[in-house]
Amino acid sequence: MKSRRINGDSVFGFANYALLCAMLFVMLYPFWHVVMTSFSDIKALAETGNVGFLPKGLSLRGYRELLLYDRLPRYFANTFLYLALGTALRLFISAITGFAISVNRFFARKFVTIAMVVTMFVSGGLIPTYMLIRALNGFNTVWVMVVPAALDVYTCIVFKTFFQQLPGELKDASAIDGANDLVMLFRIVLPLSKALLATFAIFSIVGYWNEWFSALLYLRKAEMHPIQMFLRSLLVNMETMKSGASATSMNITGTEVLMNLKVVRSASIVVTTLPIVLIYPFFQKHFAKGIMVGSLKG
Protein backbone atom coordinates (compact mmCIF):
# COMPACT_ATOMS: atom_id res chain seq x y z
CA MET A 1 0.00 0.00 0.00
CA LYS A 2 2.80 2.38 0.90
CA SER A 3 4.70 1.74 -2.34
CA ARG A 4 1.52 2.25 -4.36
CA ARG A 5 0.90 5.55 -2.60
CA ILE A 6 4.48 6.67 -3.30
CA ASN A 7 4.15 5.72 -6.96
CA GLY A 8 0.81 7.51 -7.18
CA ASP A 9 2.30 10.66 -5.62
CA SER A 10 5.21 10.51 -8.05
CA VAL A 11 2.92 10.23 -11.06
CA PHE A 12 0.76 13.06 -9.77
CA GLY A 13 3.83 15.25 -9.16
CA PHE A 14 5.23 14.50 -12.61
CA ALA A 15 1.87 15.34 -14.21
CA ASN A 16 1.76 18.64 -12.31
CA TYR A 17 5.25 19.60 -13.40
CA ALA A 18 4.51 18.65 -17.00
CA LEU A 19 1.33 20.72 -17.00
CA LEU A 20 3.10 23.71 -15.46
CA CYS A 21 5.93 23.48 -17.99
CA ALA A 22 3.42 23.35 -20.82
CA MET A 23 1.60 26.40 -19.44
CA LEU A 24 4.91 28.24 -19.03
CA PHE A 25 5.82 27.51 -22.65
CA VAL A 26 2.41 28.69 -23.90
CA MET A 27 2.73 31.96 -21.97
CA LEU A 28 6.38 32.69 -22.81
CA TYR A 29 6.50 31.64 -26.45
CA PRO A 30 4.56 34.66 -27.85
CA PHE A 31 7.01 37.06 -26.23
CA TRP A 32 9.96 34.90 -27.35
CA HIS A 33 8.57 35.01 -30.89
CA VAL A 34 8.40 38.82 -30.76
CA VAL A 35 11.98 39.04 -29.46
CA MET A 36 13.28 36.75 -32.21
CA THR A 37 11.41 38.75 -34.83
CA SER A 38 12.95 41.99 -33.56
CA PHE A 39 16.45 40.57 -34.12
CA SER A 40 15.69 39.15 -37.59
CA ASP A 41 17.01 40.44 -40.88
CA ILE A 42 14.25 41.79 -43.12
CA LYS A 43 15.61 40.21 -46.30
CA ALA A 44 15.82 36.76 -44.70
CA LEU A 45 12.43 37.30 -43.12
CA ALA A 46 10.91 38.28 -46.47
CA GLU A 47 12.17 35.04 -48.00
CA THR A 48 10.79 32.75 -45.29
CA GLY A 49 7.74 34.80 -44.24
CA ASN A 50 8.10 34.17 -40.51
CA VAL A 51 10.57 33.31 -37.77
CA GLY A 52 10.87 30.01 -35.99
CA PHE A 53 12.34 29.42 -32.58
CA LEU A 54 15.43 31.41 -33.63
CA PRO A 55 15.69 34.66 -35.60
CA LYS A 56 16.04 34.63 -39.37
CA GLY A 57 19.45 36.13 -39.89
CA LEU A 58 20.67 38.51 -37.23
CA SER A 59 20.19 42.25 -37.39
CA LEU A 60 19.66 45.23 -35.08
CA ARG A 61 18.02 47.24 -37.84
CA GLY A 62 14.67 47.37 -36.06
CA TYR A 63 16.23 48.84 -32.91
CA ARG A 64 18.30 51.32 -34.91
CA GLU A 65 15.21 52.60 -36.69
CA LEU A 66 13.33 52.74 -33.41
CA LEU A 67 16.02 55.00 -31.95
CA LEU A 68 15.61 57.38 -34.90
CA TYR A 69 12.20 58.38 -33.57
CA ASP A 70 13.00 61.63 -31.78
CA ARG A 71 9.93 61.60 -29.49
CA LEU A 72 10.59 58.17 -28.02
CA PRO A 73 12.49 59.47 -24.95
CA ARG A 74 9.70 61.98 -24.35
CA TYR A 75 7.09 59.22 -24.41
CA PHE A 76 9.07 57.18 -21.89
CA ALA A 77 9.49 60.24 -19.66
CA ASN A 78 5.74 60.91 -19.81
CA THR A 79 4.93 57.32 -18.88
CA PHE A 80 7.31 57.30 -15.92
CA LEU A 81 5.84 60.61 -14.75
CA TYR A 82 2.27 59.30 -14.95
CA LEU A 83 3.01 56.02 -13.18
CA ALA A 84 5.12 57.67 -10.46
CA LEU A 85 2.49 60.29 -9.63
CA GLY A 86 -0.39 57.86 -10.09
CA THR A 87 1.11 55.11 -7.95
CA ALA A 88 2.04 57.49 -5.14
CA LEU A 89 -1.40 59.09 -5.19
CA ARG A 90 -3.24 55.75 -5.35
CA LEU A 91 -1.33 54.28 -2.43
CA PHE A 92 -1.81 57.45 -0.37
CA ILE A 93 -5.56 57.62 -1.03
CA SER A 94 -6.01 53.88 -0.52
CA ALA A 95 -4.10 54.01 2.77
CA ILE A 96 -5.98 56.93 4.31
CA THR A 97 -9.34 55.72 3.01
CA GLY A 98 -8.79 52.13 4.10
CA PHE A 99 -7.61 53.29 7.51
CA ALA A 100 -10.61 55.59 7.95
CA ILE A 101 -13.19 52.89 7.21
CA SER A 102 -11.31 50.38 9.37
CA VAL A 103 -11.68 52.52 12.51
CA ASN A 104 -14.78 51.52 14.49
CA ARG A 105 -15.29 54.97 15.96
CA PHE A 106 -15.79 56.52 12.51
CA PHE A 107 -19.56 57.09 12.61
CA ALA A 108 -20.09 56.95 8.82
CA ARG A 109 -17.91 53.89 8.30
CA LYS A 110 -20.63 51.54 7.08
CA PHE A 111 -22.27 54.15 4.85
CA VAL A 112 -18.98 55.10 3.19
CA THR A 113 -18.04 51.45 2.69
CA ILE A 114 -21.39 50.60 1.08
CA ALA A 115 -21.26 53.71 -1.12
CA MET A 116 -17.79 52.73 -2.32
CA VAL A 117 -18.75 49.11 -3.00
CA VAL A 118 -21.75 50.24 -5.06
CA THR A 119 -19.42 52.05 -7.44
CA MET A 120 -17.74 48.72 -8.21
CA PHE A 121 -20.99 47.51 -9.81
CA VAL A 122 -22.59 50.74 -11.03
CA SER A 123 -20.61 53.15 -13.19
CA GLY A 124 -21.51 56.51 -14.65
CA GLY A 125 -20.24 55.39 -18.02
CA LEU A 126 -17.78 56.76 -20.55
CA ILE A 127 -19.81 59.70 -21.84
CA PRO A 128 -20.54 61.27 -18.41
CA THR A 129 -16.87 60.80 -17.50
CA TYR A 130 -15.80 62.51 -20.72
CA MET A 131 -18.19 65.40 -20.11
CA LEU A 132 -16.99 65.79 -16.52
CA ILE A 133 -13.34 65.93 -17.52
CA ARG A 134 -14.13 68.42 -20.26
CA ALA A 135 -16.07 70.60 -17.78
CA LEU A 136 -13.07 70.49 -15.42
CA ASN A 137 -10.72 71.53 -18.25
CA GLY A 138 -8.81 68.31 -17.81
CA PHE A 139 -7.82 67.85 -21.45
CA ASN A 140 -4.07 67.93 -22.16
CA THR A 141 -3.08 67.86 -18.50
CA VAL A 142 -0.97 65.45 -16.49
CA TRP A 143 -3.76 65.00 -13.97
CA VAL A 144 -6.19 63.48 -16.45
CA MET A 145 -3.83 60.49 -16.65
CA VAL A 146 -3.36 60.30 -12.89
CA VAL A 147 -6.42 61.37 -10.91
CA PRO A 148 -9.31 59.32 -12.42
CA ALA A 149 -7.62 56.02 -11.52
CA ALA A 150 -6.23 57.20 -8.17
CA LEU A 151 -9.17 55.95 -6.10
CA ASP A 152 -9.54 52.21 -6.57
CA VAL A 153 -12.31 50.76 -4.42
CA TYR A 154 -10.97 47.21 -4.44
CA THR A 155 -7.58 48.43 -3.21
CA CYS A 156 -9.24 50.46 -0.45
CA ILE A 157 -11.26 47.45 0.71
CA VAL A 158 -8.16 45.24 0.86
CA PHE A 159 -6.29 47.94 2.78
CA LYS A 160 -9.23 48.21 5.19
CA THR A 161 -9.30 44.44 5.77
CA PHE A 162 -5.56 44.30 6.34
CA PHE A 163 -5.58 47.20 8.79
CA GLN A 164 -8.34 45.51 10.78
CA GLN A 165 -6.16 42.42 11.15
CA LEU A 166 -3.33 44.32 12.82
CA PRO A 167 -3.07 43.87 16.62
CA GLY A 168 -5.35 46.30 18.38
CA GLU A 169 -2.85 46.61 21.23
CA LEU A 170 -0.50 48.59 19.00
CA LYS A 171 -3.19 51.14 18.22
CA ASP A 172 -4.26 51.34 21.85
CA ALA A 173 -0.67 51.86 23.00
CA SER A 174 -0.10 54.63 20.46
CA ALA A 175 -3.36 56.31 21.50
CA ILE A 176 -2.26 56.21 25.15
CA ASP A 177 1.03 57.85 24.11
CA GLY A 178 -0.94 60.70 22.56
CA ALA A 179 -0.68 59.77 18.88
CA ASN A 180 -3.51 60.99 16.65
CA ASP A 181 -4.88 59.03 13.72
CA LEU A 182 -2.40 60.41 11.17
CA VAL A 183 0.58 59.62 13.40
CA MET A 184 -0.85 56.17 14.03
CA LEU A 185 -1.27 55.57 10.31
CA PHE A 186 2.13 56.81 9.10
CA ARG A 187 4.29 55.83 12.07
CA ILE A 188 2.78 52.50 13.08
CA VAL A 189 0.32 51.02 10.57
CA LEU A 190 2.08 51.67 7.25
CA PRO A 191 5.53 50.45 8.40
CA LEU A 192 3.82 47.14 9.19
CA SER A 193 2.20 47.08 5.74
CA LYS A 194 5.26 46.95 3.47
CA ALA A 195 4.14 43.73 1.76
CA LEU A 196 0.71 45.19 1.10
CA LEU A 197 2.15 48.45 -0.25
CA ALA A 198 4.65 46.62 -2.48
CA THR A 199 1.97 44.35 -3.93
CA PHE A 200 -0.43 47.11 -4.85
CA ALA A 201 2.40 49.35 -5.99
CA ILE A 202 3.31 46.82 -8.67
CA PHE A 203 -0.35 46.44 -9.64
CA SER A 204 -0.60 50.21 -9.98
CA ILE A 205 2.65 50.52 -11.92
CA VAL A 206 1.54 47.89 -14.44
CA GLY A 207 -1.86 49.58 -14.78
CA TYR A 208 -0.42 53.03 -15.44
CA TRP A 209 2.28 51.64 -17.73
CA ASN A 210 -0.30 49.92 -19.95
CA GLU A 211 -2.73 52.86 -19.98
CA TRP A 212 -3.45 54.26 -23.42
CA PHE A 213 -7.21 54.70 -23.69
CA SER A 214 -7.32 57.79 -21.46
CA ALA A 215 -4.53 59.32 -23.53
CA LEU A 216 -6.47 58.57 -26.70
CA LEU A 217 -9.53 60.39 -25.34
CA TYR A 218 -8.08 63.29 -23.39
CA LEU A 219 -4.57 64.07 -24.64
CA ARG A 220 -4.70 65.96 -27.93
CA LYS A 221 -1.04 66.98 -27.77
CA ALA A 222 1.25 64.25 -29.08
CA GLU A 223 4.13 65.42 -26.88
CA MET A 224 2.10 64.39 -23.81
CA HIS A 225 1.38 60.86 -24.98
CA PRO A 226 2.62 57.83 -23.00
CA ILE A 227 4.74 55.13 -24.60
CA GLN A 228 1.72 52.88 -25.20
CA MET A 229 0.25 55.45 -27.60
CA PHE A 230 3.42 55.21 -29.65
CA LEU A 231 3.12 51.44 -29.69
CA ARG A 232 -0.53 51.72 -30.64
CA SER A 233 0.34 53.93 -33.61
CA LEU A 234 2.67 51.24 -34.90
CA LEU A 235 0.27 48.36 -34.34
CA VAL A 236 -2.96 50.01 -35.46
CA ASN A 237 -2.06 52.60 -38.06
CA MET A 238 0.44 50.30 -39.80
CA GLU A 239 2.87 53.05 -40.74
CA THR A 240 6.61 53.42 -40.35
CA MET A 241 8.07 56.01 -38.04
CA LYS A 242 8.19 59.49 -39.59
CA SER A 243 11.76 60.17 -38.51
CA GLY A 244 13.01 56.87 -39.92
CA ALA A 245 14.27 56.32 -43.42
CA SER A 246 11.69 55.70 -46.13
CA ALA A 247 11.37 52.42 -47.99
CA THR A 248 12.80 54.00 -51.15
CA SER A 249 15.94 55.24 -49.41
CA MET A 250 16.44 51.81 -47.86
CA ASN A 251 16.22 50.19 -51.30
CA ILE A 252 13.52 47.77 -50.24
CA THR A 253 10.21 47.11 -51.88
CA GLY A 254 7.09 45.00 -51.59
CA THR A 255 7.27 42.25 -49.00
CA GLU A 256 10.45 43.67 -47.49
CA VAL A 257 8.59 46.88 -46.59
CA LEU A 258 6.06 44.86 -44.61
CA MET A 259 8.80 42.79 -42.99
CA ASN A 260 10.68 45.95 -42.05
CA LEU A 261 7.56 47.29 -40.35
CA LYS A 262 7.07 43.95 -38.60
CA VAL A 263 10.64 43.99 -37.26
CA VAL A 264 10.32 47.60 -36.07
CA ARG A 265 7.03 46.86 -34.36
CA SER A 266 8.52 43.81 -32.65
CA ALA A 267 11.46 45.91 -31.46
CA SER A 268 9.05 48.51 -30.08
CA ILE A 269 7.13 45.81 -28.18
CA VAL A 270 10.37 44.55 -26.61
CA VAL A 271 11.50 48.06 -25.68
CA THR A 272 8.14 48.98 -24.13
CA THR A 273 7.79 45.68 -22.26
CA LEU A 274 11.32 45.32 -20.89
CA PRO A 275 11.19 48.14 -18.27
CA ILE A 276 8.06 46.81 -16.59
CA VAL A 277 9.54 43.28 -16.56
CA LEU A 278 12.69 44.58 -14.86
CA ILE A 279 10.64 46.17 -12.08
CA TYR A 280 9.29 42.87 -10.76
CA PRO A 281 12.54 41.59 -9.12
CA PHE A 282 12.60 44.62 -6.84
CA PHE A 283 9.12 43.77 -5.51
CA GLN A 284 9.42 39.98 -5.58
CA LYS A 285 10.47 39.74 -1.91
CA HIS A 286 7.17 41.24 -0.77
CA PHE A 287 4.93 40.15 -3.65
CA ALA A 288 4.35 36.49 -2.66
CA LYS A 289 3.45 37.51 0.87
CA GLY A 290 1.48 40.59 -0.07
CA ILE A 291 -0.71 38.84 -2.62
CA MET A 292 -2.57 37.11 0.22
CA VAL A 293 -2.67 39.85 2.85
CA GLY A 294 -5.96 41.46 3.46
CA SER A 295 -7.92 38.64 1.87
CA LEU A 296 -10.72 37.94 2.42
CA LYS A 297 -11.92 38.41 5.90
CA GLY A 298 -15.11 40.20 6.72
Image (cartoon, rainbow, N blue to C red):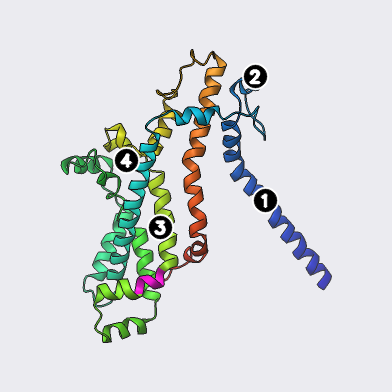
Amino acid type at mark 2: Glu
Q: Position of residue 59 (x, y in %)?
A: 60, 28
* Mark before the other along the chain sequence, 4 or 3: 3
* Mark before the other along the chain sequence, 4 or 1: 1
Q: Residue at x 30, y 61 (%)?
A: 92
* Mark before the other along the chain sequence, 2 or 1: 1
Q: Kindly check if marks 4 and 3 are in contact, taking CB atoms under 8 A apart as contact.
A: no
Whether residue 62 is situated above or below residue 129 in the rendered picture: above
Q: Which residue is mark 4?
A: 214
Amino acid type at mark 3: Ala
Q: Secondary structure at mark 4?
A: helix
Q: Quadrant of the N terminus?
A: bottom right
Q: Which residue is mark 2?
A: 47
Q: Nearer the viewer, residue 210 or 54?
A: 54
Q: Which residue is mark 3?
A: 201
* Mark before the other along the chain sequence, 1 or 3: 1
Q: CA distance from mark 4 to mark 1?
A: 37 Å
> Label for residue 13?
none
Q: Which residues are magenta?
A: 189-193
| In the image: residue 279, left or right of residue 187 | right
Q: Kindly check if marks 2 and 1 are in contact, taking CB atoms under 8 A apart as contact.
A: no
Q: CA distance from mark 1 to mark 3?
A: 29 Å
Q: Which residue is mark 1?
A: 21
Q: Secondary structure at mark 2?
A: helix
Amino acid type at mark 1: Cys
